[in-house]
Image (cartoon, rainbow, N blue to C red):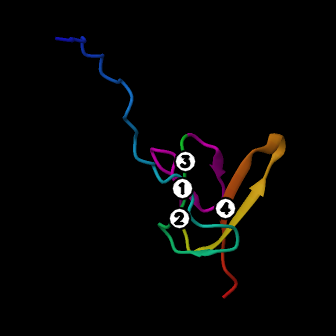
Amino acid sequence: MAHKKSGGTSRNGRDTAGKRLGVKRFDGQPVRAGNIIVRQRGTRIHPGANVGCGRDYTLFALTDGVVKFETLYNNKKRVSIVASAS
C-alpha cells in the first residue's frame, strides 16, 4: 500500500479590501460645505483656504465654492475652495 505524508498548508490566500482612497472632487468642480475632497494616508495634499483636515487626513470643504488644486514649492500640492461667482 503506497503512503505519502500530506504536504503543508499554504500561507497565502489573504487580501485586504481596497480603501477607496484618492481625489473625490476634482479641480473646477463645485462643492458644498462638508463635501469630501480627498481621502488620503498622510498629507500627500495639504489643506488650503476653506479646507479642513480630518483625523485620518481626509480633506473636506468648509464652505460652498469651487475646488482649486495648486502645486507649491518642492512639488507639494494644496487644495483650496474658492467662492463661486454666483
Q: Label 3: which residue? A: 40
Amino acid on which disc 3 is placed: Gln
Ranked by sequence position, the earlier of labels 2 and 4 is 2
Who's the residue at 47% across and 66% down the image?
34
Direction from residue 48 to residue 64 in the image, left or right: left
How far is the residue under mark 3 from the one under mark 4? 16 Å
Q: Residue placed at 71% from the left, 65% from the top?
A: 68
Residue that numbered label 1 is attached to: 52
User: Which is more N-terminal, label 4 or label 3?
Assistant: 3
Residue at mark 2: 62
Q: Which residue is mark 4?
A: 80
Name the quadrant of the C terminus. Answer: bottom right
CB under 8 Å between callouts 1 and 2?
yes
Q: Residue 54: image x %, image y %?
A: 47, 49
Q: Nearer the viewer, residue 63 or 25?
A: 25
The boundaries of the magenta stretch are 42-62
Residue furthest out toward the bottom: 86
> In terms of secondary structure, where does tag 4 sit?
strand
**The residue under label 1 is which amino acid type?**
Gly
> Is residue 43 shown in magenta?
yes
Mark 3 Cα shell of 10 Å, populated few (<14), some (14-19), many (≥20): some
Name the side, left or right, on which 9 lies relative to 41: left
